[in-house]
Image (cartoon, rainbow, N blue to C red):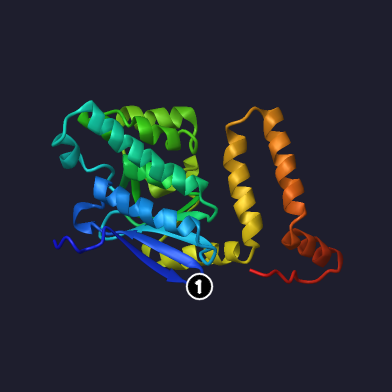
Amino acid sequence: MSNETPYVIRAVQEGVATLTLNRGEKFNPLSEEMMEALQGELDAIRNDRGIRLVILAGAGKAFCAGHDLKQMRAQPSEEYYRKLFNQCSKVMLTIQQMPQPVIARVHGIATAAGCQLVSMCDLAVAASEAKFAVSGVNYGLFCSTPSVGLSRNVSRKQAMEMLLTGEFIDAETARERGLINRVVPAEQLDAEIGKLAANILAKPAVAIAMGKQLFYKQLELGIGAAYQLAGQTMACNMMDEAALEGVQAFIEKRTPNWKR
């Protein structure tokens, strides 16, 4: 494969950026190069007000098979591994911290750090044949970093079962456990994501950005501090012209006229 082939393909249409992991023949591993490319795209998008929403997808048969184990095995030093996992954590945190909602488009397997990637997206829609696993333990490597995102989506015992056994779960089980939002036949995947995206795009960007930031911050706080932060956020949100227009439209029983 030519070195010029991009690791991540970016396509933008009507305020929606689709980022496609582009090493489908290798099941889109999160190699150093893949993470660097993905980080670059996310950094560019987070500051682009013209982009309202991000869809994260994978080329080929898989969504993402996790870290590139061959690359990892070729450089056995703790310093290298610390740097690699810090690089991965930065990507995951950027997805959560950027103002735009990120939807995972899961058409195939999502394993180990690939499952982590799904867990860190704000929303996830999967094809019915998609499968999920945190399977590192099968190779002697407990999925410690994937456990962070996984345990913030599914219950502790369900997360531990996946982490300790490395077994796959199907898409419907993933939905029932809270890892993903919706499951549809593969041929309906893009249409379903399109409907979800359109619903979000119909809302004011400022409210979405404020709400996303608050949601994740308050989860890590005690309940008192969470309410305090939420109250501050709502007060700031209420002072924005989008909220003022929305409330006025409700009072006047009309459709809000938002500037998007």
User: Position of 17 compared to 52: left or right?
Assistant: left
User: Position of 137 compared to 203: left or right?
Assistant: left
Q: Quadrant of residue 159?
A: top left
Provide the secondary structure element on which disc 1 rests. loop
Q: Quadrant of residue 164?
A: top left
Q: Nearer the viewer, residue 36 or 169?
A: 36
| Quadrant (top left, top right, bottom left, bottom right) of the N terminus | bottom left
**Residue sitting at 46 percent across and 48 percent down?**
95
Disc 1 residue crowd, few under 14, some 14–19, many 20+, Cα 10 Å: few
**Residue sitting at 64 percent across and 63 percent down?**
203
Residue 105 seen by the camera? no
User: Position of 172 compared to 101: left or right?
Assistant: left
Q: Position of residue 71 (x, y in %)?
A: 17, 41
Which residue is denoted by mark 1 in the rendering?
Answer: 14
Q: Nearer the viewer, residue 11 or 149?
A: 11
| Quadrant (top left, top right, bottom left, bottom right) of the C terminus | bottom right
Q: Position of residue 127 (x, y in %)?
A: 39, 57
Three-letter code for the amino acid on which mark 1 is drawn: Glu
Q: Nearer the viewer, residue 63 or 6?
A: 6
User: Position of 2 compared to 111: left or right?
Assistant: left
Which residue is situated farthest in the right direction here? 252
